[in-house]
Image: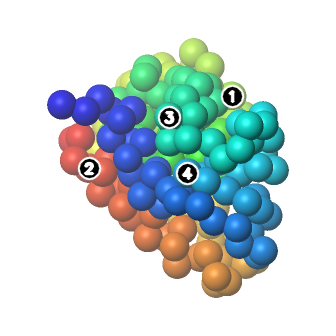
Amino acid sequence: MQSVFEQALEHVLRFEGGYVNDPHDPGGETVYGISRRYHPNAWKHGKPTKADAAEIYLKQYWQRCRCSELPAAVAVQVFDGAVNQGCTDSVRFLQLASGAKPDGIMGPMTIKATNMCDPAKLAQGYAVERAYDYALLDHLDDRYGRGWMRRLIACYDLARSYL
């Protein structure tokens, strides 16, 4: 049986996987969602492997956002949000949905507020905050907007599978 992280990683790789070098993507050359621009050390010896990507996702996103301390339904959302929209914003979405102070820092107060919430309501609230953030982007209707919304809905479906 896969761990919550492994299932969340599988979800992320469905949207981030493969080699891409889209001139319209600010991340530039990317493989498994690991961009040369934002993760130059991972590219020192060539393209990162899937195992390299998994390690980066575990350490720089899952662990940084303390996802193991969250209900599984919310953990997968926070992880995917961190990968797609950044750790600080992902934590802020969680804080807004849970009633914690929205400072973007995953500290003990955020963990406590999160774990006091009903996971189903929190998962829905998190999805709403994330969708609202997308809606505020000037370029939501460009080449990536529909894909981001598909990703958000697929992530919410994964979250609901834990409820």
Q: Position of residue 81 (x, y in %)?
A: 55, 49
Give the mark nearest the N terminus, 2 or 4: 4
Picture residue at 50% right of the left edge, 34% below the top: 51
Callout 2: SS: helix
Residue positioned most to the top: 108
Which residue is label 4 attached to? 32
Picture residue at 39% right of the left edge, 42% below the top: 8
Which residue is label 3 attached to? 51
Callout 4: SS: loop
- Badge 4 local density, few (<14 within 10 Å), some, or many (20+)? many
Quadrant where the image shows the C terminus: top left
Give the amino acid type for the residue marked by disc 2 in the picture.
Arg
Q: Nearer the viewer, residue 70 or 79?
A: 79
Give the mark nearest the N terminus, 1 or 4: 4
Q: Which mark is residue 19?
A: none
Whether residues under marks 1 and 2 lie with C-beta atoms below 8 angstroms apart, the answer is no
Q: CA distance from mark 3 to mark 2?
A: 27 Å
Which residue is label 1 attached to? 105
Give the amino acid type for the residue marked by disc 4 in the picture.
Tyr
Q: Position of residue 64 (x, y in %)?
A: 61, 25
Q: Is residue 138 left or right of residue 2?
A: right
Whether residues under marks 4 and 3 lie with C-beta atoms below 8 angstroms apart, the answer is no
Whether residues under marks 2 and 4 lie with C-beta atoms below 8 angstroms apart, the answer is no
Which residue is label 2 attached to? 160
Q: Nearer the viewer, residue 49 or 149?
A: 49
Question: Quick check: 33 above or below 26?
Answer: above
Q: Is residue 90 visible?
A: no
